[in-house]
Image (cartoon, rainbow, N blue to C red):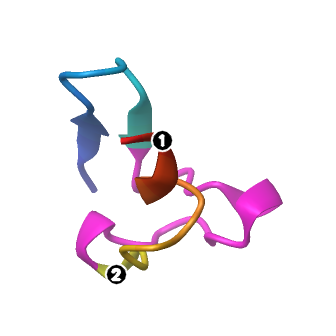
Amino acid sequence: MKTWQCVVCGFIYNEAEGIPEDGIAPGTPWEAVPPTGPVQSVL
């Protein structure tokens, strides 16, 4: 699993943890996060 960090806002996405409160299950790879999902909107 990988960890990704936005160079603009500093948001960190950890694939192993996901973001369950936003409907992104643990283990979800970054590539599978919808481009209009809650994470992408802050990037």
Density class for disc 1 (Cα within 10 Å; few <14, some 14-19, many ≥20) is: few
The residue that mark 1 highlights is 42
The residue that mark 2 highlights is 32
Gap in angstroms between the C-alphas marked 1 and 2: 16 Å
User: Which residue occupies 53% across, 70% down?
Assistant: 37
Highlighted magenta segment, given as a residue range: 14-31
Majority secondary structure of magenta residues: loop
35 versus 18 height, above or below:
below
Residue 41 pos. (x, y %): 49, 53
Position of the N terminus, as image quadrant, is bottom left
Residue 21 pos. (x, y %): 81, 56
Residue ranking furthest to the left: 7
Q: Is residue 28 left or right of residue 32?
A: right
Residue 3 pos. (x, y %): 28, 40
Answer yes or no: is residue 16 visible.
no
Query: Is 16 in the magenta?
Result: yes
